[in-house]
Image (cartoon, rainbow, N blue to C red):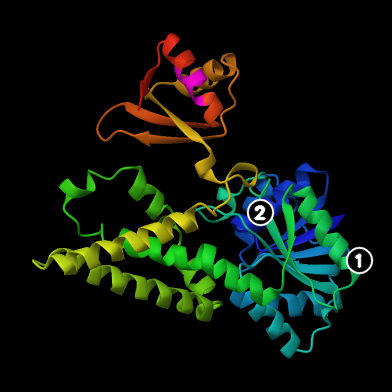
Amino acid sequence: MRTTVYGTGLIGTSVALALVNRGVTVHLVDRDPEQSRIAAALGAGTDVAPAGPVDLAVVAVSPAHVAPTLAEVMGRGAARGYIDVASVKGGPRRELEALGIDMHTYIGTHPMSGRERSGPLAATADLFEGRPWVLTPTRDTDTEVLNLALELVALCRAVPVVMDADAHDRAVALVSHMPHLVSSMVAARLEDAEMTAVRLCGQGIRDVTRTAASDPRMWIEILSANPGPVADLLCEVAADLDETVAALHALQSADEAKRRLGSAGIEDVLRRGNAGQVRVPGKHGSPPTAYEIVAVLIDDHPGQLARIFADADRAGVNIEDVRIEHATGRQVGLVQLMVWPKSASVLSTSLRERGWSIRQ
């Protein structure tokens, strides 16, 4: 399969790297020639234009530029099939239809993977491995083009998921776009906070604010392409916030009945949070709550993680997941090893015998 990737940012260059690693010929095009030269220097393909039509054109530009870019490359017959990898699907499809583009050779797609960093230098060939890759075919989509898209997903070692375009946009509003804004709102509280408070940040606040480090310009483009579903969800979050604020004020009341109502309100939102969180898939689709945590204190020295994984292997225990919480101002960290419940005591005992400090 010969491919041209239009747009050599994080996603486009990562697609190109994955394809090149599987022996695919990839041509790179970017409106900034320096970007495509960087991607080519990283081994993502060649920035020399193809001699003729390729098998598949991958448009990896921001949502606002998807339809114009596709219209241009489709208009000159640059490929047998065309896909985009933008994070919204309904809007670009409707723009293409309004332009009178033949939709038989096009399919919208979205790899559900990314990083806080952007640009070709942030790209990796394994960015999509094991991650969902949404495809949004319509009744007009040619089978040949769908097969080309599925081949690309397989070469990137992602997991294909077929969805309606608008259903996809509502889904990503729920699991990506709205959480990103909430993460930014929480992180914004830290901007002018006292340093004595900021120094107390632990893993919880790091988890909540992780995505707030992303490029604002990129996210303005994403949110501008999917504002309605995100706004609807934020209205629901706002209603929960109003009720939670009222419940917290009630907990300050001298009236015992009001305090009981406040406590019930807080408990309700926390329990609903519990119920939602357990639905988040973990490894192999298992809920994260299926695991037990063995917490181990380690020094911040080279080789410590390798040793602890080797010792777990000697104990015959598979580590299902791992998290590291770093101590503020100290060269130590707490490694949380997630294992199946039946393995937790075995691992704890074995690690203690090998000199590791286990924390409850």
Q: Position of residue 63 (x, y in %)?
A: 61, 73
- When asked about the image quadrant of residue 136, the answer is bottom right
Q: Which residue is mark 1?
A: 144
* Vertical position of residue 278 compared to residue 339: above or below: below
| Image quadrant occupied by the N terminus | bottom right
Q: Is residue 89 visible?
A: no
Q: Position of residue 106 (x, y in %)?
A: 80, 73
In depth, the one of 152 and 131 nearer the eye is 131
Q: Which residue is mark 2?
A: 13
Image position of 341 (left or right of 187): right
The main secondary structure of the magenta stretch is: helix
Circle 2 packing at 10 Å, graded few (<14), some (14-19), many (20+), is many
- When asked about the image quadrant of residue 100, the answer is bottom right
- When asked about the image quadrant of residue 109, the answer is bottom right
Total numbered badges shown on the rendered structure: 2
Query: Given this view, does label 1 or label 2 mark the residue nearer the observer?
Result: 1
* Vertical position of residue 106 compared to residue 110: above or below: below
Residue 345 lies within the magenta run:
yes
User: Which mark is on residue 279?
Assistant: none
Residue furthest front as drawn: 257
In depth, the one of 222 and 4 nearer the eye is 222
Q: Residue at x 79, y 49 (%)?
A: 155
In depth, the one of 131 and 259 nearer the eye is 259
Specify the segment rendered in magenta: 344-348
Label 1 or label 2, whichever comes before in sequence order: 2
Q: Is residue 30 visible?
A: yes
Q: Amino acid at mark 1?
A: Glu
